[in-house]
Structures are given as structure tokens and as C-alpha cells.
Amino acid sequence: MAIDAAKAKELIESVFSYDKVGADMNAVRKAPESKDALKRLSEALASKAAALAGDDSPGARDIIAKVAKERAQQYADGVKASKSGCGGLK
């Protein structure tokens, strides 16, 4: 199965839950400015999504990693906004 950005996003969203990456989500929630926590969440998402995809090619890994990084950043931005009381998420 070829992985494109849309499929990678679908895979990332399917593993973005407290059941699958909850510890890493909590780390980001506690310290949304932490680059280390953000990196761990991104790597956990990418790892789980890649396993689900069943495609271990370098191209698939790169696309999944990119989308995972974007999703982790989006989560951190949401946490920051909720802590600041701002509702203006993108």
C-alpha cells in the first residue's frame, strides 16, 4: 500500500488516543513548551502509525513522521491555547 499525506494523516489520527499514546500526550499537556515531550509524542505517533500501515519503506516512514510531527505540534498548540484561555485555534 502506497502511503500519501492523506493516508498518513488518517493513520496518525487513528492512533492519536490516550489508549495508544496517552503517556506522551500527558507529557505534552504538562509541558507544552517542552521540545523533548513534543518529540516523544511525535515519535510515538509515527511508530504506531507505521506499524498499523504495514509499510516500512523509507518514503512511507518519512511521510508518516512529517504528519506525526505536525499533529503533535497541533496538539501542543491546542494545549497552550487552552491554558492561556484563548480559543483562536487554527
Image (cartoon, helix red, strand yellow):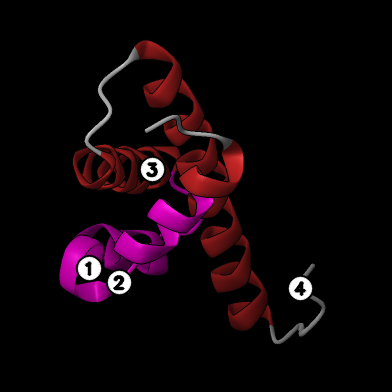
Q: Is there CB contact under 8 Å for labels 3 and 4?
A: no
CA gap between label 1 and label 4 equals 22 Å
Q: Main secondary structure of the magenta part?
A: helix
Residue at the image point whose x is 41% and y is 53% from the top: 12
Tell me which numbered mark, 1 or 4, is placed earlier along the sequence: 1
User: Start and end of the magenta stretch?
Assistant: 9-34
Residue position for label 2: 17
Q: Is disc 4 surrounded by few (<14), some (14 to 19) or many (20+) residues within 10 Å?
A: few
Tell me which numbered mark, 1 or 3, is placed earlier along the sequence: 1
What secondary structure is found at the residue carrying circle 2?
loop
CA gap between label 3 and label 4 equals 20 Å
What secondary structure is found at the residue carrying circle 3?
helix
Q: Position of residue 38 (x, y in %)?
A: 42, 46
Q: Give the amino acid type for the residue marked by disc 4 in the picture.
A: Leu
Residue position for label 4: 89
Q: Give the amino acid type for the residue marked by disc 2 in the picture.
A: Ser
Q: Is residue 27 magenta?
A: yes
Q: Is there CB contact under 8 Å for labels 1 and 3?
A: no
Residue 43 is marked as none
Quadrant of the image containing the N terminus: top left
Quarter residue 88 falls in:
bottom right
Whether residue 53 appears in this view of the structure is yes
Q: Is there CB contact under 8 Å for labels 1 and 2?
A: yes
Residue position for label 1: 22
Residue position for label 3: 42
